[in-house]
Image: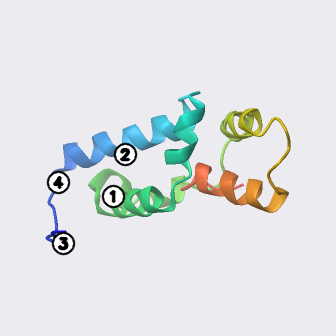
Amino acid sequence: MNNNPIHLNHDEILALIKLIFFTKFESDDLAALLYAGSPPINSALEKMLRSHPFYRDRLDVFGQISDESLEFVQSKIFKDNTENQIDDNIINELINNCIFPYQK
């Protein structure tokens, strides 16, 4: 595996940020939960937000998530957990990962 760094321009970073936010907060595809709550994707998102000139100085906008967005994310998770087979602690961790960079 080649570990050379890649370089993205600001438009490419912005496109990826928008794609990740779409996956987290707009896509109702249950399979998207795999990506919406992914720690590696959240790590990349944080790096992109910190490097993009529009977001770099505005990270405080990612405070508390809106009730509407939180309900949307929860509805996807609970739709996928219809048999209540997943522990509440795991559900909470999944919600927190899916709403990153926001907080409950």
Q: In the orientation shown, which residue stands out farthest toward the top?
A: 28
| N-term-proximal mark, 3 vs 4 | 3
Kindly indicate the quadrant of the structure image that contains residue 49: bottom left
57 relative position to 26: left or right:
left
Q: CA distance from mark 3 to mark 4?
A: 15 Å
| Label located before the other in sequence (2 or 1) | 2
Q: Amino acid at mark 2?
A: Ile
Write down the residue under mark 4.
Answer: 8
Q: Earlier in the sequence, mark 4 or mark 2?
A: 4
Q: From mark 3 to mark 1, how far is it between C-alphas?
A: 18 Å
Q: CA distance from mark 4 to mark 2?
A: 12 Å
Q: Residues within 10 Å of mark 4 (few under 14, many from 20)?
A: few
Point out which mark residue 78 bears.
none
Q: What residue is at 56 percent from the left and 28 percent from the top?
A: 29
Comes first in the chain, label 3 or label 2: 3
Q: Nearer the viewer, residue 24 or 31?
A: 31
Residue at coordinates 21% horizontally, 44% vertically from top-left?
12
Q: Residue at x 68, y 41 (%)?
A: 66
First-in-chain label (3 vs 1): 3
Alpha carbon separation for disc pair 2 and 1: 7 Å
Furthest residue toward bottom: 3
Picture quarter with the C terminus: bottom right
CA gap, disc 1 to disc 4?
Answer: 10 Å
Amino acid type assigned to the residue bearing label 4 in the image: Leu
Q: Are marks 1 and 4 in contact (CB under 8 Å)?
A: yes
Residue that label 1 marks: 48
The amino acid beneath tag 3 is Asn
Q: Which residue is mark 2?
A: 17
Q: Earlier in the sequence, mark 1 or mark 4?
A: 4
Residue topped by disc 3? 3
Helix, strand or loop under label 2:
helix
